[in-house]
Amino acid sequence: MITNTLLTVSDAAEKIGVSPDTIRRWDKKGLIKGQRSYLNYRLFNLDEVQRMHNKIKGNPSASKYKILKSKVKTKYTAIELFAGAGGTALGFENAGIGHKMLLEIDKDAVNTLKKNHPEWNVLQEDVRKFDFTKMKADVVEGGFPCQAFSFAGKKLGFEDARGTLFFEFARCIKEVRPKIAMGENVRGLLAHDNGRTLEAILKILRDLGYKVAYKILRSQYLDVPQKRERLVILAVRNDLNLPILFPKEKDYIVSMREALEKCPKSKGQEYPKKKKDILDLIPPGGYWRDLPEKLQKEYMGASFFMGGGKTGMARRLSWDEPSLTLTCAPAQKQTERCHPDETRPLNVREYARIQTFPDDWEFTGSMSAQYKQIGNAVPVNLSYHIGKCIIAMLENKPDLENMELVQPMVEQASLF
């Protein structure tokens, strides 16, 4: 755990023998967590900074990479919608939560689920045509796609969401009446339609009889070697006196070096020669700005003259940091995910390692389908931490060393 030894950037730099700019760079990259003092100074935990320094020197005390799994299986069960390739389901199972059913429409993802867990009740169905009224479970969960609602009537109620996949998620909650519901989405949902979409979601869950809270979870501080942020919504049925708990961030990160050690070889995409020649010139952790200006203009084209950092273009990952957020394809120009040493995109098994899928979790379908399944998944270890929180909520036994107690959010008076 983090100790109380908090130092200014200058004092921390002097203690471990690096420059203050180095510590500022680590903070900016999300490798360490600074906090503001009452005088508005950035303060850093000395132990955390020292651990980061050890990683950079290639001398970690011990690898932090592992697939988290509890030895205890609970009596609690879940229904999962939009199950994908199983990141959330596997994380919940590893935490100790069983599944009554997993619903998914994509045939490749369904085949992946069935191949790895033939005992799971996996259904390839369109959620819009499924009747949940005869089903019961402690938890309903799902990563519903985000679409704008119709605000014509400005009621922001259950019917306003009709036609969206969130409506189907809400309908499942209405018909099953679980003790807890968990929804997850991208960070962008916070700002979607100027925040109205998120507030409509929260209002609908309240109208269904649930108290709700949400939080942005940063995967790189929750045992995932990836800078991936997810917005997680937790809802507890009003008749239950249960707390709302979210995982507390750890005081360490997991680097790509730790994650990809002895990674099994697998198939993966390749670069065309022209792109490979460019990326050969990029150092670990670098991107297009590390090229000579002539090549920058040639490679970037019109984008060179546009605003924004465009830091995903011609990007090579770094061994000493968590990966950038994985996308559905590692060779897209806007979001390159080039191997730290070899000039190639990350391969399928490396993608899976970074999402904390175990090495024996097999993905079905074409190579592009496999990348898509992995890139769309919730990291397994992140789901494990959420699952442990949900178990503690159901048992009303908060583990405040590893979990944060969050108060339900009050409904806004008006959005207009």
Image (tube, rainbow, N blue to C red):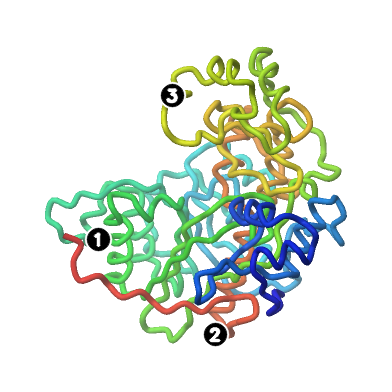
- Which residue is label 3 attached to? 305
Q: Is residue 137 left or right of residue 266?
A: left
Query: Which of the labelled discs sits on residue 158, or is there none?
Result: 1
Badge nearest the viewer, 1 or 3: 3
Q: Quadrant of residue 389?
A: bottom right
CA separation in Å, label 1 and label 3:
45 Å
Q: Does residue 341 appear to the left or right of 178 in the view shown?
A: right
**Which mark sits nearer the N-terminus, 2 or 3?**
3
**Dividing the image into 4 quarters, which one contains the N terminus?**
bottom right
Residue 411 relative to residue 283: left or right: left
Q: Nearer the viewer, mark 2 or mark 3?
A: 3
Q: Which residue is mark 2?
A: 396
**Residue 184 in the image, given as x and y percentages of width and height:** 47, 57
Q: Residues within 10 Å of mark 3 (few under 14, many from 20)?
A: few
Percent x, y of residue 78: 53, 65
What is the three-letter code of the residue carrying label 1?
Phe
The mark that comes first in sequence, 1 or 3, is 1
